[in-house]
Image (spheres, rainbow, N blue to C red):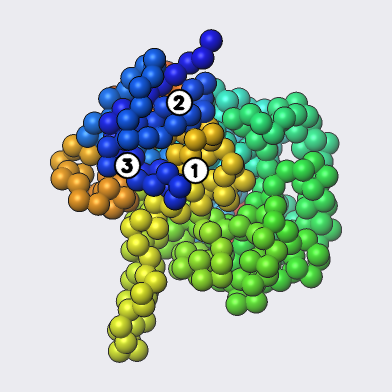
C-alpha cells in the first residue's frame, strides 16, 4: 500500500535549478520518495499545511563527533590544543559503550530538532568492539540519515595522536561493515574516520587508506587545522604516498598551500568546513571561498558541541560573516572595491544542503527537493517574530531563522518533527545523556584524584 504525504502551500526553495523556487508550492511524498514538486498538487494523501512556512531540503552536517553530546559545553573557552588534552586525553578514555549509545541517540535527535536530516558521525571513540555497535544503535534508533565514520580508539593521546603506530583494528572494521552495512542503500552508511599523516606514521596511514578502499567506503580526515597540523603538509604527504582520491573528505583545510588546494581539486576530493569551531578554537580562517575558487563545493559541519552550538544556523552565519569580514578588511586595506563574487545568503543555503549531500556522497538521495530523491524535508515557520515579514526566503532561513523556527522535519518521508515538537521519546534520551554526563564527571574526578592528568600536545 502506497503511503503519501502532501506538504501544501509552502514557499518551496528546492535547491534544484530544474524545479526552482515556488512562492506557493506543494511537495508530494510517496513511500519516502519525493514524487512531485509543483505549484498545486491534488492527491489522496495526509496533508501538512505549510502556509506561512519555508520548505527546504534538510541540512547536512558533514563532520560531527556525536559521541561528545554528554559533555556539551565543558570546554567553552578551549583552543584546539586545549581540546586534545581536555577532551581526547581526559574524557574520551572514560567512555563506556552505554555513554556512546546515549550520546549518539541524543545527539542525532538534536540534529533532527535543528533541521539536520543527514549527519556524518566522525566516531573516534571505539575504545572496545562494543563502542561502534553502541554508536550505530543510537543513530539507528533516532531515524536520522547518517554516514557512520568508524574512527580510532581514544584511550591515550600519546598512543593515538603523536605519530601513532596503532592502526584501527581491520578485523573489527570489517565486522562492522558486514554486520551493519552489508548494503549501501539504507538510511545508515559507513565511512572511515582516519587520523592521517602527521598524526600517524606512514605505515598506519597507508594501512587505513587501503582498508577503506578494500571495503569500498569513503574516507574522512582532519587536515591543515591549527598551528600543529598546519605544518604537516598532510595533503602533500598523501599525494606523495599515492593516496589522494575522490573518496576522501578533507575537514577544516584552513592552512592549505596553493599546491594542496590544487591537489584536492584535481583528485576529486571534497571539503568540510566547521566555521564556528575554526574561528573560536584557532584552527584558522574558514576557507569557504578558497574552496569555491578552486572549483570545489564546500560543505558545513558542527564538529564539537563541547565548545560550539550544534545547529546549522550558527555555522551558516559564522562562515558568511567570517568570509565577508576577511574580504572587506583586505579590500579596505588595499583601498579597492569588494569583488563581485562575495558570498551570498543564497549560496550559504546551497552549501548547507546540496553541497553537504555531495560531500557525504549522498547527492543522488538528498540535498534538494528533486522528484525521485528521498524525502528529507524541513519546514521553517516564517510567521515567527524573528523571521517575518519575509522579503527573501533564502535569506530568511540563513540569516533570520533559528532552531525554534524548525517546525516540521521529514527523513526518508517519515515525520520526525511536527508542529515544532520532535516525534520521539526525548525524555528517555535526555535521561540517558544526563546519566552519561554524571558517570563521566565522576570518573574524571576519580582520575584526577589519582593524579592521572594528560599531556599537552607539542607546540
| Of marks 2 and 3, the one in the foreground | 3
Q: Position of residue 225 (x, y in %)?
A: 56, 64
Residue of label 1: 367
Q: Residues within 10 Å of mark 1 (few under 14, many from 20)?
A: many
**Alpha-carbon span between mark 3 and mark 1:** 17 Å
Q: Does residue 143 appear in this view?
A: yes
Residue of label 3: 22
**Alpha-carbon span between mark 2 and mark 1:** 15 Å
Residue of label 2: 29
Q: Which mark sits nearer the N-terminus, 2 or 1?
A: 2
User: Disc 1 on helix, strand or loop?
Assistant: loop
Rendered residue at 47%/64% (across/down): 288
Q: Does residue 418 appear in this view?
A: no
User: Disc 3 on helix, strand or loop?
Assistant: strand
Q: Which mark sits nearer the N-terminus, 2 or 3?
A: 3
On screen, 71 above or below 328? Answer: above
Rendered residue at 67%/28% (across/down): 133
Residue furthest out toward the bottom: 335
The reply to whether the C-beta atoms of the residues labelled 3 and 1 are less than 8 Å apart is: no
Amino acid at each position: 500500500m502506497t503511503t503519501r504525504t502532501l506538504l501544501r502551500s509552502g514557499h518551496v526553495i528546492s535547491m534544484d535549478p530544474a524545479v526552482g523556487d515556488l512562492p506557493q508550492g506543494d511537495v508530494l511524498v510517496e513511500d519516502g520518495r519525493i514524487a512531485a514538486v509543483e505549484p498545486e498538487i491534488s492527491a489522496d494523501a495526509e496533508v501538512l499545511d505549510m502556509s506561512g512556512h519555508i520548505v527546504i531540503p534538510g541540512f547536512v552536517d558533514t563532520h560531527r563527533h556525536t559521541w561528545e553530546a554528554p559533555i556539551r559545553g565543558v570546554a567553552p573557552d578551549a583552543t584546539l590544543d586545549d581540546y586534545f588534552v581536555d577532551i581526547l586525553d581526559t574524557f574520551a578514555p572514560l567512555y563506556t559503550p552505554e555513554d556512546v549509545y546515549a550520546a549518539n541517540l541524543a545527539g542525532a535527535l538534536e540534529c533532527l530538532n535543528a533541521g539536520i536530516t543527514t549527519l556524518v558521525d566522525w566516531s573516534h571513540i571505539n575504545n572496545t568492539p562494543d563502542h561502534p555497535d553502541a554508536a550505530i544503535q543510537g543513530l539507528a534508533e533516532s531515524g536520522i540519515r547518517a554516514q557512520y565514520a568508524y574512527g580510532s580508539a581514544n584511550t591515550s593521546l600519546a598512543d593515538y595522536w603523536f605519530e601513532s603506530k596503532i592502526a584501527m583494528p581491520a578485523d573489527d572494521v570489517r565486522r562492522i561493515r558486514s554486520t551493519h552495512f552489508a548494503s549501501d542503500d539504507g538510511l545508515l552508511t559507513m565511512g572511515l574516520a582516519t587520523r592521517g599523516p602527521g598524526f600517524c606514521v606512514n605505515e598506519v596511514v597507508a594501512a587505513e587508506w587501503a582498508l577503506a578502499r578494500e571495503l569500498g567506503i569513503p574516507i574522512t580526515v582532519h587536515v591543515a587545522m591549527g598551528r600543529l597540523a598546519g605544518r604537516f603538509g598532510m595533503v602533500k604527504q598523501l599525494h606523495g604516498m599515492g593516496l589522494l582520491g575522490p573518496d576522501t573528505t578533507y575537514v577544516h583545510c584552513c592552512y592549505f598551500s596553493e599546491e594542496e588546494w590544487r591537489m584536492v581539486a584535481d583528485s576529486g576530493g571534497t571539503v568540510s568546513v566547521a566555521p564556528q569551531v575554526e574561528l573560536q578554537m584557532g584552527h584558522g580562517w574558514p576557507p569557504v571561498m578558497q574552496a569555491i575558487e578552486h572549483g570545489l563545493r564546500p560543505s558545513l559541519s558542527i564538529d564539537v558541541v563541547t565548545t560550539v552550538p550544534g545547529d546549522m544556523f550558527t555555522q551558516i552565519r559564522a562562515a558568511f560573516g567570517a568570509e565577508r569580514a576577511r574580504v572587506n578588511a583586505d579590500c579596505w586595506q588595499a583601498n579597492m572595491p569588494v569583488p563581485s563574487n562575495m558570498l551570498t545568503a543564497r549560496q550559504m543555503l546551497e552549501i548547507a544542503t546540496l553541497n553537504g549531500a555531495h560531500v557525504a556522497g549522498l547527492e543522488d538521495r538528498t540535498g534538494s527537493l528533486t522528484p525521485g530523491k528521498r524525502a528529507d524535508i524541513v519546514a521553517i515557520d516564517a510567521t515567527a517574530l524573528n523571521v517575518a515579514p519575509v522579503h527573501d526566503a533564502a535569506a530568511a532561513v540563513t540569516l533570520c531563522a533559528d532552531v525554534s523556527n524548525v517546525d516540521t522535519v521529514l527523513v526518508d518521508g517519515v515525520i520526525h518533527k511536527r508542529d515544532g515538537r520532535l516525534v520521539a521519546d526525548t525524555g528517555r534520551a535526555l535521561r540517558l545523556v544526563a546519566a552519561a554526563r554524571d558517570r563521566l564527571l565522576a570518573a574524571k574526578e576519580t582520575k584526577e584524584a589519582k593524579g592521572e592528568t594528560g599531556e599537552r600536545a607539542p607546540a
